[in-house]
Image (cartoon, rainbow, N blue to C red):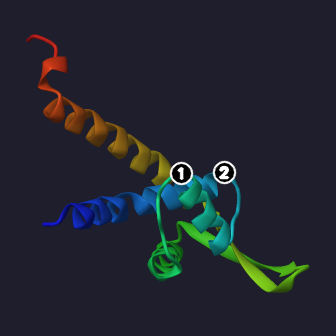
Amino acid sequence: MAPENNSAQMRKGVLELCILASLDRAPSYVPDLIADFQQSGLSVVEGTLYPLLTRLKNAELLTYQWEESRSGPPRKYYRLTDEGRRALLEHRQSWDELVQAVHLILNPQTRKAE
């Protein structure tokens, strides 16, 4: 598998966590989410984001609200539900455990002697 494909697959795997974490900070609409991700070095396009947002909404992890815009048509702002906040906590815990395990595999010299 090409290195760029590996990177794309890893990004897709953590995108749901990133969406939930971003919306936990503040309600947002898609261009703001994309800008937030790009500032962090995570390149995401609308075509990737919208299906995930729809799936998360259908799972009742987020909801949306239309808000008027001063510079154009109304905007759809996504926000976490209470269930979405619970899911975020679970995702964070799973992520922390995964990062720790991968770190130990990639850096076996950091393992404590048993």
110 relative to 100 in the view: left or right? left
Q: Residues within 10 Å of mark 1 (few under 14, many from 20)?
A: few
Q: Residue at x 55, y 60 (%)?
A: 38
Circle on res. 25: 2
Q: Earlier in the sequence, mark 2 or mark 1?
A: 2
Of helix, strand and loop, which one carries label 2?
A: helix
The reply to whether residue 80 is visible in this rendering is no
Total residue callouts: 2
The three-letter amino acid code for the residue at tag 2 is Arg
- Callout 2–callout 1 Cβ contact below 8 Å: no
* Quadrant housing residue 67: bottom right
Of helix, strand and loop, which one carries label 1?
A: loop
30 relative to 14 in the view: left or right? right
Q: Nearer the viewer, residue 42 or 55?
A: 42
Residue 35 in percent (x, y) is at: 62, 63
Q: CA distance from mark 2 to mark 1?
A: 15 Å
The three-letter amino acid code for the residue at tag 1 is Ser
Residue 25 in percent (x, y) is at: 66, 51
Residue 62 in percent (x, y) is at: 58, 68
Residue 32 in percent (x, y) is at: 67, 66
Residue carrying label 1: 40
Circle on res. 20: none
* Quadrant housing residue 75: bottom right
Which residue lies most toward the bottom here?
A: 73
Q: Residue at x 50, y 75 (%)?
A: 45
Which residue lies most toward the left here?
A: 114
